[in-house]
Amino acid sequence: MSTPRLAVALAVLAVLGGCAGAPQTSTPEADATVLVSNDGDTAYRASVFVVTEPLDGVRVAGANGTNRTFDVERLAAVPPVALGNATAVEPLDDGRRVWRVTVQPETGVSKSFADVPANATVVWSLRRAGAPSRPLRGWGTVTCGAEAGKLRLDVRVSAAGPVSADVTCRSAPS
């Protein structure tokens, strides 16, 4: 066998044998940190979900006791009217990560999620603790995109009552 044919044959064997490796097709990973601070005088219940769209649906609980599941792949596809008096918003995703915590007055808690897809979406909601039938005080979603290596979400209940949320996205180290 000639040298060029031998080189081609060895290259084909290396690829077929798995020795040459496969191209990288996985989604880059990131870290997500969520901090919930309560400067008020009432305890709050926080729910945090880390998901990757497309979703398997979104479940919305209403103040009138109804539960509706929307067969949507994106949170933005849920009709806004369905969220007006929502007491809970829950994205449905087999790979989701969930954190539910009660935040006492004048305290703060945090949770870090390691190795989440860099394009993951963090869904958060906040309601008064012990009042599951009252509408949410606040809720939202944040996504940093595939380039981000770190996502930090700060949700705060001020002493005067308003809820705010700030997100910081940082690039992954190169």
Image (tube, rainbow, N blue to C red):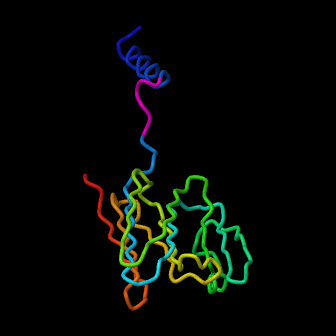
Q: Please tell me which residue lies in front, 107 or 72.
A: 107
Q: Quadrant of residue 153?
A: bottom left
Q: Residue at x 60, y 58 (%)?
A: 93
Residue 139 is left or right of residue 134, and the answer is left
Question: At which x and y percent is residue 138?
Answer: 50, 81
Q: Is residue 69 above or below residue 16?
A: below
Count of residue discs: 0
- In the depicted structure, whether residue 50 falls above or below residue 131: above
Nearer to us in this view, 93 or 25 = 93
| Residue found at x 61% / y 62% | 55
Name the residue rendered at 44%, 50% in the picture: 27
The residue furthest top is: 1
Residue appearing at x 43%, y 21% in the figure: 14
In the rendered view, tell whether residue 40 sits above or below residue 16.
Answer: below
Q: Is residue 20 magenta?
A: yes
Q: Residue furthest bottom?
A: 160
Residue 106: give x, y in percent of width and height.
36, 78
**Residue 142 on the magenta span:** no
Q: Is residue 107 left or right of residue 43?
A: left
Magenta part mainly helix, strand or loop? Answer: loop
Quadrant of the snapshot with the N terminus: top left
Residue in the foreground of this view, choosing between 172 and 12: 172
- Image coords of residue 134 (percent x, y): 61, 83
Look at the image and give the residue range highlighted in magenta.
18-23
**Percent position (x, y) of residue 84?**
62, 86
Left or right, residue 123 beside residue 113: right
Question: For residue 78, which quarter of the picture?
Answer: bottom right
Above or below, comparing residue 47 to residue 13 in the picture:
below
Decide which of 106, 63 is in the foreground and name it: 106
